[in-house]
Image (cartoon, rainbow, N blue to C red):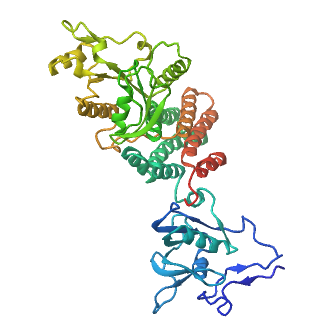
Amino acid sequence: MVKLHTLANKKQFPGLICNTALQIYPRNELVPSETQRRTIYALSTPFGKAGVAVVRISGPDALNVKHAITRPSVKRFGDKETIPWMMERCQVVHPIHGNTLDDGLVVFFKGPRSFTTEDVLELHIHSGRAIIAAVLSALANLPSCRPAEAGEFTRRAFEGGRLDLTQVEGLKDLINAETEGQRQMALEAAGGAARAQFEQLRSIIIECLVYVEGFIDFGEDVDELGQERMYEEARDRAREISEIIEGHLNDNRRGEILRSGIRLAIFGPPNAGKSSLLNFLAQREAAIVTPIPGTTRDVLELTLDIGGLPVIVADTAGLRKSDDVVENIGVERAVNIVKGSNVSLCVLPLPDVLEHPSMDLRVEIPPSLQPLVSPKTLFLLNKGDLTKQSSDDRRRIIGNSGLNGRAWITSLHTSEGTVEFLEGFTKTLQKMYDIHGDDFSSRSPLITHARHRDHLNSALQHLRYFLTIRESLDFAAEELRYAAKAIGKVSGLIDNEDVLDVLFRDFCIGK
């Protein structure tokens, strides 16, 4: 039998204010294993100097931790029991020798009405490295506590039923959001909007299954006409849900792209103004600009917020034939970047591509660039200050070239037309990804992660196979079960341990 010693002895440890159930183990005796130490702790705010740092503790001994490492800074009257969800001023003390570590605030959340559904304690202390280190070290002295693993707080919220997997993913995306579009999309997912939609899809499949199983179980008690109606009702609902899933799958991966960033490649001939355009978008000297052809030899990438959309802009080498080995490598990389981009922006010097300036005004795209032009290619006709056309002539140039809504004439040197270009370019991107102005939630995409797409594809295949089966109703019912199970995996109703491990490991330690 292992002998246990309580920490809270007022004579030995005057800093403690009451007896607790926390215990310390003498040397050379058994200590609890990692799995036995169910109470976890971590810093939930970033390291560094700031006004406040939050240390979060979650688990069955959270309240005992409060009694062991805090004592009131002001005299309390009346009921001395801990009041959940009320913030108190306190002194944070060491549980062994009772030394004061900091003066701060403490709040206790009684489970299951907490983020993790367990008892949760939060210490709001001053954010200095020495203070944080001292408090974390003090918590390490409590045998029932251990440091939290990455994402463990959120995983406990998932396991306790507070969140489903789509909400967990939304929470993670919300923490990582860098633009307004990403924030609104992630906030909807974290709030359960995606969960509700997936649950609706799954419930319709289960309704189909009820009809088929009812047909199997009670078919003998129903006349032939009634049997046919039951089965056709199930098939009609399966067709309906198949069309809905197909609509979500045929979204051009809009959700994944908005979450991870729209990949935009800037390409064109040398000295067209590609690097100047990158500097204009970034509002700083991000790229070297010189009149020497071939200055840009490698791909330069920046992540920008354009109209609330996350855009990963890649400035590429000028596309031309060269005897320079290094430049040719840059040209090859540029071609690959353009082909792999979601949107491309071709920058052309207007004086060089203007065809028949005295007659039919139009631009001629160089033959070397034509293989890279696609329906998602936009055009910036730069150096417009060198051609001296009127506004009407410029509109005719774009119209005659078949580039209405896809091209703008500017001068990056004089800033002429840049405001109109940025406004038009932003609206074009928003239209491409079905974003209306600043309303990013009007038609928020359902699929935001690749695994959502995989599970929906699987469900659709099972539904399609169900629609082809007429003879064996047992097999038909099994296909519906597989379809419902595939959608259940999206929200975590049917879990996959490998998916859970990958998802929670990418969270920060304190979340």
**Residue 37 in which image quadrant:** bottom right
349 relative to 496, above or below: above
Instruction: Name the side, left or right, on which 499 lies relative to 110.
Output: right
Relative depth, front residue between 159 and 227: 159
Residue 194: x %, y % from top left: 45, 46
Residue sitting at x 42%, y 47%: 178
**Residue 375 in which image quadrant:** top left
Residue sitting at x 56%, y 53%: 507
21 relative to 194, above or below: below
Relative depth, front residue between 297 and 393: 297
Image quadrant for the N terminus?
Answer: bottom right
Residue sitting at x 56%, y 35%: 454
Residue 404: x %, y % from top left: 26, 20
Q: Is residue 64 visible?
A: yes
Q: Is residue 119 visible?
A: no
377 relative to 177, above or below: above
Residue sitting at x 45%, y 92%: 77
Residue 457: x %, y % from top left: 54, 33
310 relative to 382, above or below: below
**Residue 69 in which image quadrant:** bottom right
Relative depth, front residue between 344 and 274: 274
Image quadrant for the C terminus?
Answer: bottom right
Residue 205: x %, y % from top left: 52, 40
How many numbered discs sit on the rendered protein? 0
